[in-house]
Amino acid sequence: MCCKGFLKIMMFVFNGVIFLAGAAILAVGIWVAVDRVSLLGFLEHIEDAPPELAQLANVGYLLIGVGAFLTLVGFLGCCGAVKESKCMLLSFFTVVLIIFLVEVAAGVVLFVFEPLVRSDAPSIEDNYGSDESFTSVWNSTMNELKCCGYNNYTDFMNSQFVSTTSSYPVTCCTSSSGPCNEIAAKADVPSFCWCNLM
């Protein structure tokens, strides 16, 4: 009986947190959808806020959907645990099982099709330095994620940028104050690259 009571309390607390988080996300989503102007005004007063934070105004309906879903799941779990309702608990575990299966399926699809996506994606060697919009996107990404290329500086070795300037992007040489050449880029290779997570 002690173990059953402990599980009941833990289920209530865990789902209560999910319910409250869902309610908070739902409230922010409704606020963003209804009053974008005040949100943008609020974001302007935050010091050192990245400009990308203003994109939050565009995701109001997504926040409403996610918040409503989390609120529903948290409600089913809380009430199901407290009342020991088989119907609510079955609904809760069905929703959790569906989420789990979708995540596993998405992981398998990403794993299977990753080589296809990589081969079809525009490469850094072909486009960096020659295509202005491609170069701009990569510069923004590397600055934001504090990385150099997809893997490291070797992604740029045969690019038009390196061929014409004999240097690498500045983000490849964060610990060097001199020009970003191959020697400086090689000395600054990180052990982990956030760009790999894209």
Image (cartoon, rainbow, N blue to C red):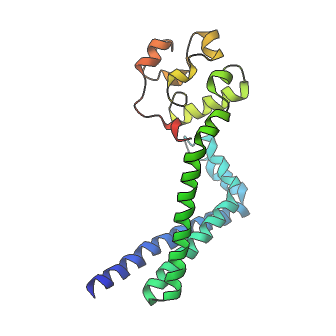
In front here: 7 or 40? 7
- Give the total number of marks visible in the rendering: 0
Q: Is residue 169 left or right of residue 55?
A: left
What x and y, as percent, mark residue 31? Answer: 67, 64
What x and y, as percent, mark residue 197? Answer: 52, 41
Q: Is residue 1 left or right of residue 178?
A: left
Quadrant where the C terminus sits is top right
What x and y, as percent, mark residue 33? Answer: 71, 62
Residue extending furthest left?
2
Q: Is residue 76 left or right of residue 163?
A: left
* Location of residue 102 with respect to 6 vertically, above or below: above
* Location of residue 89 with respect to 192 vertically, above or below: below
What x and y, as percent, mark residue 3? Answer: 28, 82
In front here: 85 or 174? 85
Q: Is residue 41 visible?
A: no
Q: Is residue 108 visible?
A: yes
Q: Residue at point 28% right, 88% down?
A: 1
Q: Residue at point 65% right, 15% down?
A: 160
Q: Quadrant of residue 135?
A: top right
Residue extending furthest front?
112
* Location of residue 181 with respect to 76 vertically, above or below: above
* Location of residue 146 with respect to 70 vertically, above or below: above
Q: Is residue 5 left or right of residue 23?
A: left
Q: Residue at point 49% right, 13% down?
A: 182
In front here: 100 or 112? 112
Q: Residue at point 58% right, 76% down?
A: 72
